[in-house]
């Protein structure tokens, strides 16, 4: 059974007309997860509202204050910009805190033995949010907060795997230099936000695998197997967290990699195997990117089921 944490506020967060990070993303996933073969494997739960104390596990008080102050000026359906890409509407703060709450509650469920797999079906995404600022559609960083929450719960080694097409610069900044935490990212390079180069790697803490535009399913799987899996095996995580971005799909408008649903199914199965080997099966995934609405729902369903849709 996979626990799915979500909340209506995550559907109501609205950055504005034609913004790629729009409510239709969650609608497309929810529709895809109603498939008869998958639906019985899922248990849907309301994401709790995260606390300011949880936000401060990964972010500075100054960053939180900026968000709270800007939110106080979002009135009567207006919007305010944290940066050119990251827009607050009247539901954004609650949605961002629900994303934090989902990730923290999911960690609690895994550590307590209530579940072995959790998927946070939340937005806005988070992996570009640094300790000090919002950026790239991201207000807070739920997966980084979840890593620190797990350490508070006594987990000594936590790994984060990020397969979004964009490098999770914010997660890297949050986790860099922290004992017992590993951040692994596969991403297109060169590409936004311009970070994630191999020279940024730190043994046992940061591992970036930049990939050229046009990388195919076969090449991606071969490099993940040869380069990422040994890093995870050497670290021996006790809990596996995933920044699950689906914008490396070949049809995504914001990326240039050439993956399809079969590789997302493969990633789901492969990461579950890592969790089984090292983490007592404990796996938590947080939705990040994915902006082609026709591809996003089937990609998430493939990841959760470990099976690509028939063609």
Image (spheres, rainbow, N blue to C red):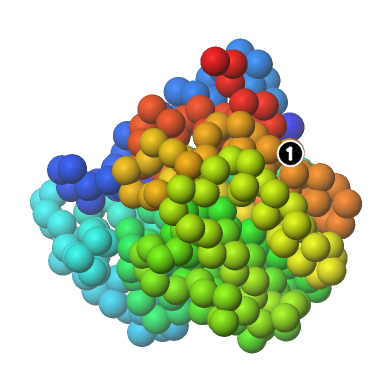
- In the image, 43: left or right of 19? right
Q: In which quarter of the image is the C terminus?
A: top right
Q: Which residue shows up at 52% across the image and 49% down it?
A: 215
Q: In this view, does 186 lie above or below 219?
A: below
Q: Quadrant of the N terminus?
A: top right
Is residue 214 at least partly visible in the picture? yes
Instruction: Name the foreground residue: 216 vs 112.
Output: 216
Q: Which residue shows up at 66% across the image and 51% down it?
A: 284
Q: Which residue is tagged 1?
A: 269
- In the image, 266: left or right of 145? right
Q: Position of residue 183 (x, y in %)?
A: 64, 69
Q: Position of residue 210 (x, y in %)?
A: 54, 64
- In the image, 236: left or right of 68? right
Q: Which residue shows up at 36% across the image and 84% down it?
A: 62
Q: Which residue shows up at 24% across the image and 69% down it?
A: 82
Instruction: Name the foreground residue: 31 vs 6.
Output: 31
Q: Is residue 203 above or below residue 254?
A: below
- In the image, 181: left or right of 39? right
Q: Mark 1 packing: few (<14 Cα in 10 Å), some, or many (20+)?
A: some
Q: Where is residue 272 in the image (x, y as percent from the top left)?
A: 76, 44
Q: In this view, does 144 lie above or below 34?
A: below
């Amino acid at each position: 059974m996979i626990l799915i944490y979500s909340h209506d506020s995550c559907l109501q967060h609205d950055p504005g007309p034609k913004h790629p990070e729009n409510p239709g993303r969650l609608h497309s996933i929810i529709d895809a997860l109603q498939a008869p073969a998958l639906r019985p494997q899922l248990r849907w739960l309301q994401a709790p509202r995260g606390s300011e104390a949880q936000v401060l596990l990964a972010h500075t008080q100054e960053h939180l204050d900026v968000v709270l102050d800007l939110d106080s000026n979002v009135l009567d359906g207006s919007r305010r910009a944290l940066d050119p890409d990251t827009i607050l509407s009247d539901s954004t703060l609650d949605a961002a805190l629900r994303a934090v709450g989902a990730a923290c509650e999911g960690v609690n469920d895994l550590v307590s033995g209530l579940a072995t797999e959790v998927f946070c079906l939340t937005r806005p995404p988070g992996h570009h949010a640094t300790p000090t600022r919002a950026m790239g559609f991201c207000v807070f960083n739920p997966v980084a907060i979840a890593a620190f929450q797990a350490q508070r719960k006594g987990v000594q080694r936590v790994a984060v795997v990020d397969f979004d097409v964009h490098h999770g610069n914010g997660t890297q900044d949050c986790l860099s230099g922290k004992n017992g935490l590993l951040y692994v990212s596969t991403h297109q390079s060169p590409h936004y936000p311009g970070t994630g180069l191999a020279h940024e790697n730190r043994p046992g803490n940061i591992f970036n695998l930049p990939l050229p535009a046009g990388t195919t399913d076969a090449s991606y799987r071969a490099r993940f197997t040869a380069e990422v899996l040994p890093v995870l095996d050497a670290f021996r995580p006790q809990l596996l967290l995933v920044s699950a971005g689906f914008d490396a799909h070949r049809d995504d408008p914001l990326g240039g990699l050439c993956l399809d649903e079969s590789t997302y199914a493969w990633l789901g199965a492969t990461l579950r195997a890592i969790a089984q080997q090292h983490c007592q099966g404990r796996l938590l995934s947080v939705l990040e990117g994915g902006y082609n609405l026709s591809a996003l729902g089937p990609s998430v369903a493939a990841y959760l089921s470990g099976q690509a849709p028939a063609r």
